């Protein structure tokens, strides 16, 4: 369990401070391009290990490839900080969740900010694959190249008391990330009680009663011991946790052209490995938390139907305010297409 606890999922808005002064992609006298990559993934985690393997492969690429220097543990700040550092050319690349990516291109929110839109990871995978070229183009238009996409299973709700229906949730004080005023307004409109806090305030908030329900991926809940203060987990596929590794276009273009194809292939392999490991770790985390007292609440068909109806009720407010209208509409169209074909596309 201790080993698993170290594998904290890189979650958006972890309030970690401190931005080091890093170097430019190519310093005077250097022949190999240096790429500084920031991530919230902890040092030694499977995410970090996959990035280290990627760094070795990049170093061996044709024409010297590139020197990938990884800054884990959120040492370059939270995801908003890392996006800002990439824009001012201090960082050149970052492994981000959809929260950070949406700071660059809001359309990415269509993959993560629509509760219960996806019934399973196959549906999500289909929509993700279909949207990816559009999202990658939009990110490219804003100066970012996508190296690979990842997902890490489902975000779940943890609560101090059992929360089996939306009506139960409306009696809860629910954590939301500070600064997301649109989400707060939408939740209040529909009868929920959001409490905006920074990530570092989750545990104190649970302890004092300021909040009593938290959406979190299981790996993060395990590592931060959310389950010891909110020992009830709703077994509901709320939303997938999505991310991508991006690099500033100007830094990417400083890498020898003959090396880029090899480097992109290595990046795709890293993304596949991270995705496979993170999905397994999500399941392993639930098992580990159950051993230390977590109660997992499976829902009846009637209860799940109530949650789905509650989610669908807020979709019109999410459209255009949280997720760009064209992306929202395309996600729904793609799901109709996939389900109409019996999930065999």
Image: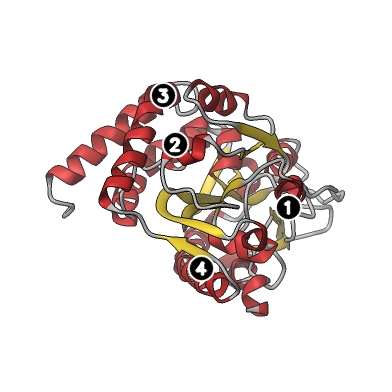
Report which residue position mark 3 lands on.
Answer: 319
Residue pictured at 38% horizontal, 59% vertical? 298
- Label 3 and label 1: CA atoms lie apart by 31 Å
Q: The residue tagged with tag 1: helix, strand or loop?
A: helix
SS at badge 2: helix
Measured as percent of width and height from the top left, residue 311 is found at 38, 35
Hey, which quadrant is residue 250 in on the image? top right
Mark 4: few, some, or many residues within 10 Å (few <14, many ≥20)? many
Q: Are marks 2 and 1 in contact (CB under 8 Å)?
A: no
Query: Mark 3 and mark 2: span between their CA atoms?
Result: 23 Å
Residue found 74% across the figure and 60% down from its top = 73
Name the residue beneath numbered marker 1.
203
Left or right: residue 341 versus residue 38 is left
- Please tell me whether mark 2 or mark 1 is closer to you in this view: 2
- Of residue 116 and residue 151, the one placed in the foreground of this image is 116
Instruction: Residue under label 4, please give it.
Output: 286
* Residue 94 appears in the figure: yes
Q: Which residue is mark 2?
A: 167
Q: Earlier in the sequence, mark 4 or mark 3?
A: 4
Disc nearer the start of the sequence (3/1)? 1
* Towards the viewer: 90 or 298: 298
Instruction: Give the CA separation, mark 4 to mark 3.
Output: 32 Å
**SS class, disc 3:** loop
Give the foreground label among 4 and 2.
2
Q: Residue 235 bears which disc, if any?
A: none
In this image, 113 relative to 199: left or right? left
Tell which of 214 and 104 is nearer to you: 214
**Which is nearer the eye, 224 or 191?**
191
Identified at 69% across, 61% down, the residue is 224
Please name the residue shown 39% across and 52% down the image: 237
Q: Residues within 10 Å of mark 2 (few under 14, many from 20)?
A: some
């Amino acid at each position: 369990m201790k080993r698993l606890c170290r594998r904290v999922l890189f979650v958006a808005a972890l309030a970690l401070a401190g931005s080091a002064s890093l170097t430019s992609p190519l310093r005077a006298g250097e022949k190999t391009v240096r790429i500084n990559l920031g991530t919230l993934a902890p040092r030694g985690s499977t995410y970090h290990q996959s990035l280290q393997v990627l760094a070795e492969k990049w170093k061996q690429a044709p024409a010297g490839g590139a020197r990938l220097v990884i800054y884990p543990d959120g040492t370059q700040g939270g995801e908003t900080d890392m996006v800002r550092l990439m824009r001012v050319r201090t960082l050149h690349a970052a492994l981000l969740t959809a929260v950070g990516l949406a700071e660059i291109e809001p359309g990415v929110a269509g993959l993560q900010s629509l509760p219960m839109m996806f019934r399973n990871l196959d549906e999500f995978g289909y929509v993700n694959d279909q949207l990816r070229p559009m999202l990658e183009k939009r990110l490219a238009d804003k100066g970012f190249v996508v190296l690979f996409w990842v997902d890490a299973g489902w975000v779940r709700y943890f609560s101090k008391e059992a929360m089996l229906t939306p009506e139960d949730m409306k009696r809860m004080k629910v954590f939301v990330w500070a600064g997301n005023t649109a989400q707060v307004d939408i939740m209040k409109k529909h009868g929920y009680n959001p409490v905006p806090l920074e990530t570092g305030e989750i545990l104190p908030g649970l302890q004092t009663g300021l909040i009593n329900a938290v959406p979190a991926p299981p790996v993060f809940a395990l590592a931060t011991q959310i389950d010891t203060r909110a020992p009830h987990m709703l077994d509901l596929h709320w939303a997938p946790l999505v991310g991508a590794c991006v690099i500033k276009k100007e830094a990417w273009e400083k890498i020898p052209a003959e090396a880029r194809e090899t480097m992109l292939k290595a990046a795709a392999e890293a993304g596949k490995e991270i995705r496979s490991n993170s999905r397994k770790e999500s399941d392993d985390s639930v098992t580990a938390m159950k051993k230390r007292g977590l109660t997992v609440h499976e829902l009846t068909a009637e209860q799940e139907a109530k949650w789905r109806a509650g989610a669908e009720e807020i979709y019109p407010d999410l459209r255009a305010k949280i997720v760009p209208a064209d992306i929202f509409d395309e996600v729904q169209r793609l799901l109709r297409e996939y389900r109409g074909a019996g999930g065999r596309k």
